[in-house]
Amino acid sequence: MLDQYDKITEATAFIRQRWNLAPKVSIILGSGLGGISGVLADAVTIPYDEIPHFARSTAHGHAGQLVCGLLAGVPVVVMEGRMHAYEGYPLQQITFPVRVMRRLGAELLVVTNACGGLNPQYRTGDLMVIEDHINLLGDNPLIGINDERLGPRFPDMSAPYTPTLIDAALAVARRDDFTAHRGVYVAVTGPNLETRAEYRFLRTIGADVVGMSTVPEVLVAVHSSMQVLGISVITDMCLPDALEVATVEHILAVARSAEPKLRAIILAAVKAAG
C-alpha cells in the first residue's frame, strides 16, 4: 500500500490538468446506471485508460469513464462504471479511484449498484438504501502495510453508511412516493450468479440483497474519512423457491428504468453537501 500515495498524487495531478474544480461529492454509478452523468453541467469526460494507474472497466453496462462537472451547481466527480473482483483486478486497484476522488477534495461518496433481492418483501425495481454490509469477497483492500497518510490502521465500521444520509434518502422516497427500503448488502465475487442453496445461506446470515461490488469502495471511503451513501437497485429477485433465470439484458433494463428514482436521491444528497 505504501506505493499508492505517489500513484494517487500522479492520477490526481492528471485530472486537475483537465478539470480544475474541487469536487464536494464523488459518485460511483453501477450497471446500467450511467445516464445520471448526462445531466452534469460543464462536463469534462476522461476515459479511465487515459488516467494514470486507473484500471479499465470491462463489465456490461459500464462506460468506463470519469465525468467531472456541476450537479445542481455543486462540483462532483462521477465514475461512470466501476471495476469488479471478477474482472481479475486486486481490490486495491478496484478502489484506487476512490482514493483519487478523495484527494481531489470529495468528502462524500455516493455509491450505487444493481443487485439481486433476497428479502421476499422486496420487488424488482425497488431501491434499497444500504444501512450495513457483509463482506464475502474473501479479501479486503486495506490488507497490507498501512499508510497513515491515507487512513488509520484499524478503521471503525460501526456505521460505515452515514445514518443522516440514510434517513434523508428515505425521506426523498416518501416525498416522491416510490419504494425504498433500508437493508443489508452482501458482496460476493461472482461472476456467476448464486445457486439456490447459496441464496438461502445469504438470506439466513442477514442479507437483504446480493451483489458483486460496493463493499471494497466503502471500506476505502471509510478508511479515508468520507461520508457514505449507498443505494442498490433491485434488478431481479433471488428467491430460492421461485427462482427465475436472470439475463444481463433484463438486469440492465430494470436498472435503467429505476434511474429517475435514483437520480432524485442523489440530487438531494448533492444539494445537501453543497
Image (tube, rainbow, N blue to C red):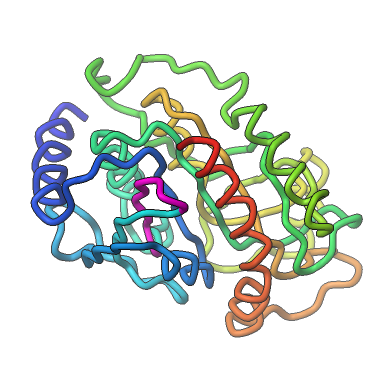
Magenta span contains residue 94: no
Q: Position of residue 145 (x, y in %)?
A: 24, 21
Q: Nearer the viewer, residue 211 or 235?
A: 235
In the orientation shown, which residue stands out farthest toward the front?
73
Main structural element of the magenta stretch: helix, strand or loop? strand
Q: Position of residue 162 (x, y in %)?
A: 60, 28
In the drawing, does residue 206 fall left or right of residue 255? right
In percent of the image, x 66 and y 34: which residue is there? 132
Q: Quadrant of residue 113?
A: bottom right
Q: Nearer the viewer, residue 226 or 222?
A: 226
Against 219, residue 15 (above or below) is below
| Residues rendered magenta in the picture | 72-80
Q: Nearer the viewer, residue 34 or 71?
A: 71
Total marks shown come to 0
Magenta span contains residue 77: yes
The quadrant of the image that shows the N terminus is top left
Against 178, residue 170 (above or below) is above
Q: Position of residue 128 (x, y in %)?
A: 72, 51
Q: Position of residue 46 (x, y in %)?
A: 21, 64
In percent of the image, x 79 and y 69: which residue is there? 124
In percent of the image, x 72 and y 56: which residue is there? 127
In the orientation shown, which residue stands out farthest toward the bottom?
249
Q: Quadrant of residue 103?
A: top left
Q: Quadrant of residue 87?
A: bottom left
The quadrant of the image that shows the C terminus is top left
In the drawing, does residue 84 fall left or right of residue 9? right
In the drawing, does residue 68 fall left or right of residue 208? left
